[in-house]
Each structure stands twice: as C-alpha cells, then as structure tokens.
Amino acid sequence: MIFIDACKRKETPYTPIWMMRQAGRYLSEYKESRKKAGSFLELCHNVDLATEVTLQPVDILNVDAAILFSDILVVPLEMGLPLEFLAGEGPKFSRTIENYQDVCALKQDAYLKLDYVYDTISKVRGSLPKDKALIGFCGSPWTLATYMIEGEGSKTYAKSKKMLYANPQTMHYLLKQITDELKGYLSMQIKAGANAVMIFDSWASALEKEAYFEFSWGYMKDIAHYLKTHFPEIPVILFPKGIAGYLESIDGKFDVFGVDWGTPMELAKRILGQKYVLQGNLEPSRLYNEDSMEMAVDEIISIMGKKAGHIFNLGHGMLPDLPRENAIKLVELVHKKTKR
Ligand code: CP3
C-alpha cells in the first residue's frame, strides 16, 4: 500500500494523497446514503451504509486511502452523554460534564460498545482494493473533553478552560478516562482491519503553550506510545490544528505529523521533517478555484520534493460546498506532478 509505505518513509512511485472529510455533503452520493439512513448518527450506526460512504471517495476521487466513516463524538456518546446532530447547527450533547461527580458517572469500557465501528472497518477492509489503505481515527482527549464540557462547538472554550485552571485535577481525571477509552478504541479498530490510525486534535489552538503540552499533547503522546508498543507496524498520525508556534516542542513516538493550513509547510519541514513524515497542508478553500488550487499544489510539492517523507492532504477538512470536480482534479494533479 503506497499510503502505508509513505507513512514509513519508504520510496513510493508518487506522493500519496487523501483528504480530511473526504466523505461528506459535497458528494451527492453521500447525501443519498444519509437520506437512506435517516440521520447522520443513524448513518454512523448503519454498517452497510457507513461502509458505502467510506468507499465513495475512493471510487470517485481515486485517493490512496479511505478513512473510516464515523465521528469523533461516538466515544463520548457511548460514555453516556446523549448526542444529537441538529441540521445546520452541528453536534449537541443534552447533558454535559460540569464537575468531578459528572466524570465519576461516565460509563467505563465504552469502547466495547462500538461494535458498529469495528464491523464497518471489517466490512470496508473486505471490499477495499488491496493497494488502498484504511485509516481509523478518534478525536484527541482534549478535543473530546471540550465537547463533553461545552455540550457543543465553542468559540471561547470558556467552560473547559475554567475547569482546566480552576479544577485541574478534575480535568486530568476526565482526560485520563477518555485516554483509556481511546487506547481500547484504536486497538479494536486496528484488530478489525484499520491499516493506520489518526488522532484529530481539532481544538489544539484553544490552549496556551504550557497548558497545551500538559492537557493535550501529553495524552496524545501517551496513546501513540501505547499503540506503537502494541502494534509497532501500524502507522500513527497526529494532527494538532493551529499550533504552528509550538512546533519546536513537539516530540513523542509516532510516525506522521499532520500539518494544518495555517502552519507554513517550510517551517514544519525545517523543524519536524527529519523526525516525522509530514502530511498536509493545502488550504481547503483553494478548491473553490482551480488556479488557486494548482498554484498551492506546486508550492507544496516544491517545498516537500518528490522524495519520501510527504503525504499530500488538505490542511483541514473538505467543506460542504466545495466543487467535487476540483477534488477529483486535485488527486490527478498530485499523482501526475509527483510521479518519480
Ligand atoms: O471523510 C471523513 O473524513 C470521515 C468522517 C469524519 C467525520 N467527522 C464525518 C462527519 C471524520 C474523520 C470526522 C471527525 C470530526 N468530527 C472532527 C475532527 C476533524 C475536524 O474536522 O476537525 C470533529 C471536530 C468532529 C465533530 C463534528 N462532527 C462536527 C463539529 C460536525 C458538524 C460540522 C458540519 O460540517 O456540519 C460533525 C458532523 C459530521 N461529521 C459530518 C460529517 C460528514 C457532517 C454531518 C452531515 O452529514 O450533516
């Protein structure tokens, strides 16, 4: 698998590419499948339909890897927090974590209730072409904790930060509990057939440096270390969004560092490129215009070169109204321009 070879810094015939949020509303096929399922969460629960939408972008875009179709929030859901996705508003938990007692009341071993995810992985792996990789994933403990505390997306993360600074032990207790679940969750995903795993720290940028390393990166590193000990052959990808200023302090045992669009690729290469394979980092909105897209593709390839050490990706997720033709074009361009 070209994608897995690239994660291990092996030479490949071209630079592999996949796109964060490659399954989604910009594809009419996805909207059809979601309609059949009834709702987004039902789509996550339905093994046949989740398999279908996982495979759609591989067929349509010709990307080198599929990413499991699910959501990072199914873990807090199974930990006992009722979740809804309201149309146009995003995720909402009707109950949230406010204090130590709330953390104590969370269900343990939630990862044993996520069979629908593991079944989807087995089913996808069964139908995916042999040369295409399947990526499993989870949210980072910090990013999941913010949703569990705020109850929804937030602009200020005020409740989460209040707990972090006023009751750091409670925050650590919550993060530790989530971390234990994620170790089990990603292990089960690997056993079900995931060829690589990725941890999304989407709200990394909410924290100042010292707090970031204590309350987020430390836990991501712990999960990565656990996985590299138990499954040394499975590449681990870490994606902390929005921490360009902290790159000098990034360390730990993992394979691929996901570079977001706000981090200059040159900077990431200079600081981390020797130690980790870099994945990224096209600004997704460039897909609104073909010329803007191609200019940035050339720029990224000129920085990263055509040698091992780079996986092409967006610097964050696809947007619902991006033109699919440009997503298809992007994959063609990267394959053509990086041919060895
Ligand atoms: O194709 C893929 O990348 C696989 C599937 C995937 C989804 N969510 C599907 C989804 C993945 C990897 C995620 C991760 C995820 N979910 C993250 C981390 C990555 C990131 O983008 O930063 C986060 C923060 C979430 C939480 C979440 N899920 C939000 C905030 C939303 C609403 C956003 C929106 O665009 O409406 C979701 C819903 C969601 N997850 C959708 C999809 C395709 C859209 C739901 C729909 O069909 O209406």
Image: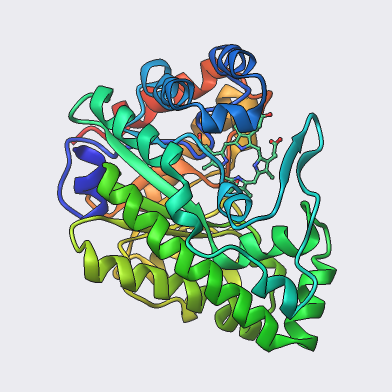
Relative to residue 296, is residue 11 depicted above or below? Answer: below
Instruction: Classify residue 42 as left or right of residue 310.
Output: right
Please tell me how many numbered marks the rendered image carries: 0
**Residue 305 at least partly seen:** no
Instruction: Classify residue 134 as left or right of residue 153.
Output: left
Tell me what residue is drawn at x 65 percent, y 26 percent: 288
Tell me what residue is drawn at x 48 percent, y 34 percent: 69
In this rendered view, identify the residue nearer to me: 121 or 256. Answer: 121
In this rendered view, identify the residue nearer to me: 109 or 134. Answer: 109
Give coordinates of residue 253: x percent, y percent: 31, 73
Which color scheme did the rendering employ for the protein?
Answer: rainbow
Relative to residue 176, is residue 47 depicted above or below? Answer: above
Give coordinates of residue 211: x percent, y percent: 65, 82
**Residue 22 at least partly seen:** yes
In this rendered view, identify the residue nearer to me: 185 or 333. Answer: 185
Q: Where ligand 1 lies, by quadrant?
A: top right
Tell me what residue is drawn at x 71 percent, y 60 percent: 148
User: Where's the C terminus, which quadrant?
Assistant: top left
Give coordinates of residue 8: x percent, y percent: 21, 55
User: Where's the N terminus, which quadrant?
Assistant: top left
Tell me what residue is drawn at x 26 percent, y 67 percent: 228
Instruction: Classify residue 87 as left or right of residue 68.
Output: right
Give coordinates of residue 46: x percent, y percent: 50, 26
Relative to residue 192, is residue 276 depicted above or below? Answer: below
